[in-house]
């Protein structure tokens, strides 16, 4: 078996000679991939033979490598994985993902047998706001990952095993003997995901801004929470999945007339900050930097506010466009033209006022100690409504 593993590799076209064909048994699939054929080939050491196919029709077989072994729509999103982590621990699931980053190939010695194993960690993404780390212990797949291109290669991963990682404090995946990885699968969803991966923001703050911009209707956020409840869930949650909340609180910090700049230019492609001195997006992963897209930028608010109620406070909440423009009734371009006195007057129209704040929250993770909170809408409310809807705890 070791000789076969060293001689043949994924993608090789082979001739299998004098193998015994039998129907597959479904009573134990723990160590066997689930494939589309009802048959299994069994090779005998002294009778059967496997050799490389020597004809010139190999290209026809290579097309099969892009066909997933599961139906095209039979997969979970990463949002499903993180949102249902408790129920999915130890389960095998299917994923359609794009490669976000590929870690270095490492050799790890097992404690019991002292055996050297090849290990590689790959971070994958889809249209969800959070990524997933997948650990590969298979040497063949580890070496194949060298050819995977971040934000370009799409993978259909059948039967990846999910578990909770105490060190990373998030759900992670593991490639097992059951797992089959189809590179750049020939399905429509894969092409849509590739287009998304090419332009999707990857920095947490940019991801949060993208969530805020694309949120369908902030008025649909009606889950009322206190400031303390939001902060507790954002800092102690097992899941890194974003959540929304409606908070009734006062704006206790809002610096509109200080020395810091409160507007900036953003790239319309990746939502990263544009250097106004050169007028170009400096994000190396953006399509503008690679010359694929032409530079396009727009002015936007970049404010930080603190919301507080009787239970606690939410410091450093991001109040960006268009929520800031609506709350202040002033566009970023008009704000840039205001005098210092006018900015002070504008500040006191919102500071210490009771408001209904609709929030989207990215919880803290191992790599990011503090949660990120974005204000999608900030509306002043009357005292009777504020008192009636503010939760006790």
Image (cartoon, helix red, strand yellow):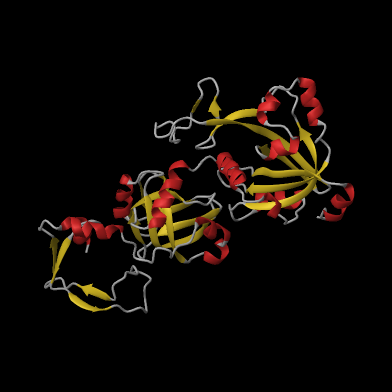
Q: Position of residue 364 (x, y in %)?
A: 61, 47
In the rendered view, would you say 90 is above or below 266?
Answer: below
Query: At 66% across and 50% down in the image, what residue appears?
Result: 234
Q: Which residue lies furthest to the right in this view?
A: 384
User: Is residue 136 something that shows in the picture?
Assistant: no
Task: Count every numbered label the image shows and give the total.
Answer: 0
- Closer-to-camera residue (129/17): 129
For residue 268, above or below residue 107: above
Residue 124 at what x, y percent from top left? 44, 50
Tell me residue 314's x, y (percent): 73, 43
Q: Is residue 101 left or right of residue 309?
A: left
Pick whichever, 345 or 62, lies toward us.
345
**In the rendered image, which quarter contains the N terminus?**
bottom left
Can residue 295 be spotted in the picture? yes
Left/right placement of residue 170 relative to residue 160 reads: right
Q: In this view, does 261 lie to the left or right of 134?
A: right
Residue pictured at 82% horizontal, 34% vertical: 349
Quadrant housing residue 273: top right
Seen at 67% across and 52% down, the residue is 244
Would you identify the image quadrant in which residue 287 lies? top left
Quadrant that contains the C terminus: bottom right
- Where is residue 182? Give x, y as percent: 33, 57
Foreground of the two, 346 or 125: 346
Q: Which quarter of the figure has residue 7?
A: bottom left
Please give the name of the residue rendered at 48% of the width and 52% of the height, measured from the top-left corner.
132
294 versus 92 height, above or below: above
């Amino acid at each position: 078996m070791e000789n076969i593993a060293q001689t043949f590799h994924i993608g090789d076209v082979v001739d299998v000679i004098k193998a015994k064909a039998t129907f597959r048994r479904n009573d134990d699939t723990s160590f066997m991939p689930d494939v589309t054929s009802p048959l299994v080939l069994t090779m005998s050491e002294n009778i059967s033979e496997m050799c490389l196919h020597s004809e010139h029709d190999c290209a026809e077989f290579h097309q099969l490598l892009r066909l997933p072994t599961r139906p095209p729509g039979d997969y979970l999103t990463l949002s499903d994985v993180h949102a249902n982590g408790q129920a999915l621990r130890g389960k095998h699931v299917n994923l359609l993902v794009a490669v976000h980053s590929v870690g270095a190939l490492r050799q790890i010695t097992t404690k019991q047998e002292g055996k050297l194993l090849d290990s590689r960690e790959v971070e994958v993404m889809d249209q969800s706001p959070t990524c997933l780390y997948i650990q590969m212990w298979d040497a063949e797949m580890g070496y194949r990952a060298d050819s995977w291109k971040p934000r370009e290669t799409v993978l259909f991963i059948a039967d990846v095993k999910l578990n909770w990682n105490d060190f990373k404090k998030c759900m992670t995946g593991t490639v097992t003997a059951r797992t089959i990885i189809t590179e750049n699968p020939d399905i429509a969803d894969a092409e849509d995901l590739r287009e998304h991966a090419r332009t999707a923001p990857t920095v947490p703050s940019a991801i949060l801004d993208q969530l805020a911009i694309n949120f369908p209707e902030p008025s649909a956020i009606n889950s009322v929470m206190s400031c303390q409840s939001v902060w507790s869930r954002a800092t102690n949650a097992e899941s890194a999945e974003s959540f929304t909340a409606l908070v009734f609180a006062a704006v206790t910090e809002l610096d509109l007339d200080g020395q810091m700049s409160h507007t900036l230019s953003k790239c319309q492609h990746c939502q990263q900050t544009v250097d106004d001195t050169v007028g170009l997006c400096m994000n190396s992963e953006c399509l503008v930097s690679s010359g694929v897209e032409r530079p396009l930028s727009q002015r936007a608010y970049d404010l930080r506010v603190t919301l507080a109620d009787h239970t606690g406070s939410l410091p450093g909440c991001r109040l960006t466009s268009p929520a800031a423009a609506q709350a202040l009734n002033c566009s970023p371009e008009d704000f840039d033209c205001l005098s210092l006195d006018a900015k002070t007057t504008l500040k006191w129209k919102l500071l210490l006022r009771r408001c209904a704040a609709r929030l989207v929250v990215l919880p803290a993770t191992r790599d990011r100690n503090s949660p990120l909170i974005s204000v999608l809408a900030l509306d002043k409310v009357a005292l009777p409504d504020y008192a009636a809807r503010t939760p006790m705890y």
